[in-house]
Image: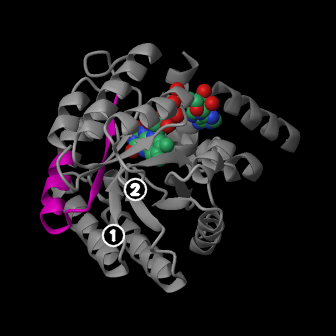
Amino acid sequence: MLRSALLAASRSPSLRTVVEKLPPTRTIIDRFVAGDALAQAVAVCDSLVASGCRVTLDHLGEDTLDATQATATAEAYEKLLAALKETGLAANADVSVKLSAVGQFLPADGEKVALDNAYRICAAAADTGTTVTLDMEDHTTTESTLGIARELRADFPWLGVVLQAYLHRTEADCRDLAGAGSRVRLCKGAYQEPASVAFQRKREVDQAFMRCLEVLMAGEGYPMLASHDPRMISHARQMAERHSRRNDTFEYQMLYGIRPDEQQRIVTRGDTMRVYLPYGQAWYGYFMRRLAERPANLGFFLRALATRS
Ligand code: FDA
């Protein structure tokens, strides 16, 4: 119930306006977001890299219906990639992009605008010497996102895509995308989806995650295991051993601010740990999905609000 309400709230423009105007609750938001500005993102990225992690940076934004905003987001990524090059962080940091932030939902030619903007970002990443991964949004975008990824991969074969284990289709998508060189980030899925397309129970989602991971680990690509779940992490390790995968042929990924001790433990044991690091002013949708994943986070947020008012 609570999860559904929070996920519905994450897509509500009117609630977004109200929540973004609430008294500053930076402490709780900063737990998940590097800050508003590029310089803050680069500073946090630098400290994560110094601690042995790799990083994927996300310029926050989604669901844009404004072509100018979509272009501005592509430009923000170009600036970010230039900063990664200048600071020498590109060897350990790449970027993650939501196609809805670069125009996918624009009426008429949204897919074309998103493809063109994503192409610009990929070209800038190639120039910087790093990579891009396309985030996956709700199921109405899956086919379009995978189609755009296919087109981009013709010129940028290193382009990564996210697959969400909760979707019924994903095991088959994993088989399609398990070929040599294919970078796939597997997550459980963070959106509210109907039973017609997605598993609803946690146990079913976890089992689907393990089946999908098995397909990716058995394949020839580069699996990116995006989960904070200790069971998924331990299964991944066993699968890697069973498939004789060296630890530079797959990686673990977690969100900034979630289980940082476990992130360090994975680094210390010699595996690759990449932290997903969002920054920018459009934190609302991202933050609400993090609240929905863990009701305890909502408690912290409400307490922060209460003590500020
Ligand atoms: P699960 O939700 O079962 O949580 C396992 C444990 O992790 C919890 O018991 C708790 O300890 C901890 N935990 C999980 N979420 C937490 C939170 N918000 N706060 C505090 N603790 C928490 N989704 C999507 O639909 N599209 C996408 O493109 C991406 N991209 C993405 C990238 C990366 C790098 C990660 C790690 C995740 C995503 N996600 C995503 C989100 C993903 O789908 C999923 O919602 C979250 O990772 C939570 O699922 P877990 O696998 O962590 O398991």
In the image, what residue occupies the spot 42% across and 22% down?
206
Q: Can residue 292 be seen by looking at this rendering? A: no
What is the distance, in whole Å, between disc 2 and disc 1 at their CAs? 35 Å
Q: Secondary structure at mark 2?
A: loop
Q: Quadrant of the N terminus?
A: top right
Q: Is residue 41 magenta?
A: no
Identify the residue at the far bottom of this view: 86
Q: Nearer the viewer, residue 88 or 114?
A: 88
Q: Secondary structure at mark 1?
A: helix
Q: Nearer the viewer, residue 300 or 261?
A: 261
Residue 273: x percent and y percent? 52, 52
In the image, what residue occupies the spot 60% across and 62% down?
52
Q: Is residue 12 above or below residue 44?
A: above
- In this rendering, position of residue 140 left or right of residue 70: left
> In the image, which is nearer the foreground, mark 2 or mark 1?
2
Q: Can residue 214 be seen by looking at this rendering? A: yes
Q: Which residue is mark 2?
A: 248
Residue 135: x percent and y percent? 36, 49
Residue 266: x percent and y percent? 58, 47
The colouring scheme, among rainbow, by chain, secondary structure or one colour, is one colour
In the image, what residue occupies the spot 50% across and 80% down?
83
Q: Is residue 287 above or below residue 42?
A: above
Q: Is residue 157 magenta?
A: yes
Q: Nearer the viewer, residue 71 or 167?
A: 167
Q: Earlier in the sequence, mark 2 or mark 1?
A: 1
Q: Which residue is mark 1?
A: 71
Start-end of magenta stretch: 146-165
Quarter assignment of residue 168: top left
Query: Which amino acid does the dot numbered 2 rest on?
Result: Asp
